[in-house]
Image (tube, rainbow, N blue to C red):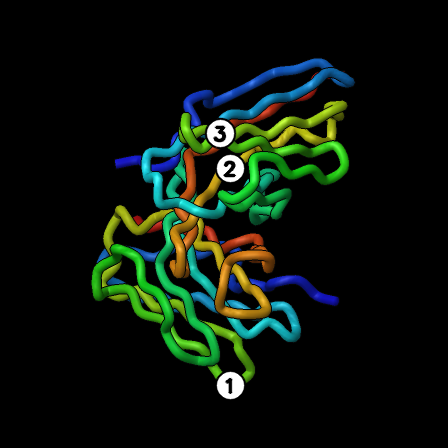
Amino acid sequence: DAGVTQSPTHLIKTRGQQVTLRCSPISGHKSVSWYQQVLGQGPQFIFQYYEKEERGRGNFPDRFSARQFPNYSSELNVNALLLGDSALYLCASSPGGGLRNQPQHFGDGTRLSIL
Amino acid sequence: DQQVKQNSPSLSVQEGRISILNCDYTNSMFDYFLWYKKYPAEGPTFLISISSIKDKNEDGRFTVFLNKSAKHLSLHIVPSQPGDSAVYFCAATLPGSRKLIWGLGTSLAVNP
């Protein structure tokens, strides 16, 4: 079975632009979470979606938005990009919405660089 | 404010010996803890978890110990293998929360 797939793997944008990152969860997984990992730090939680509804949101500005589609894939959108948005964006999927006894499976991430 | 702390950025051990990775936390309400391993250019991979109602959980070469009074947990890898060389992250979550709170990671090097 395929794992969590993310696209694109790398992306270069300039300040002020908008970006869309995509994630396909493991087949049968209904929950997708997004994390931002800045170099040298641990991942920071951005969003969780379960059954196409937002179930959790981290401390990120409104420039960050996401959605989940009927096939449980997800998109993360970031508007008005800033230099500080340069990071590795990780998507994780799990069967249900909880975190206990059903660990999240991560994709390899999208490396976003802002010039 | 780092609620989950991994104070050792790096650790080097000899193949076959024990690796001990440490993690401290500040929020006594955390009730579930996880360890993830991350290789370069790959996403984190789940290793082992522990609920706050336990003080030990074991899975093969990996054992996690939880000391709630000290707000401290540790991951033991015995015996260490060169393939264990990676960055190890400790993460925690609150009851009913949908998010994991992560430490900064510890880079483990296992030397042949």
Give the side of residue A66 with respect to residue B52, left or right: left
Question: Is any atom of residue A105 visible in this view?
Answer: no
Nearer-the-camera pick, A98 or B47: A98
Residue at the image position 70 percent from the left and 66 percent from the top = A2
Quadrant in which residue A75 is drawn? bottom left
Q: Where residue A83 sits: x, y (%)?
A: 26, 48
Q: Amino acid at mark 2?
A: Phe
- Name the residue at 64% across, 21% down: B19
The C terminus of chain B is located in which quarter?
A: top right
Mark 1 secondary-structure assignment: loop
Q: Nearer the viewer, mark 1 or mark 3?
A: 3
For residue A70, the mark is 1
Does label 1 lie on the same chain as label 2? no
Q: Are marks 3 and 2 in contact (CB under 8 Å)?
A: no
Q: Badges 2 and 1: C-beta atoms under 8 Å apart?
A: no
Query: Which chain's residue wears label 3?
Result: B
Disc 2 crowd, CA 10 A, few/some/many (<14, 14-19, 20+) = many
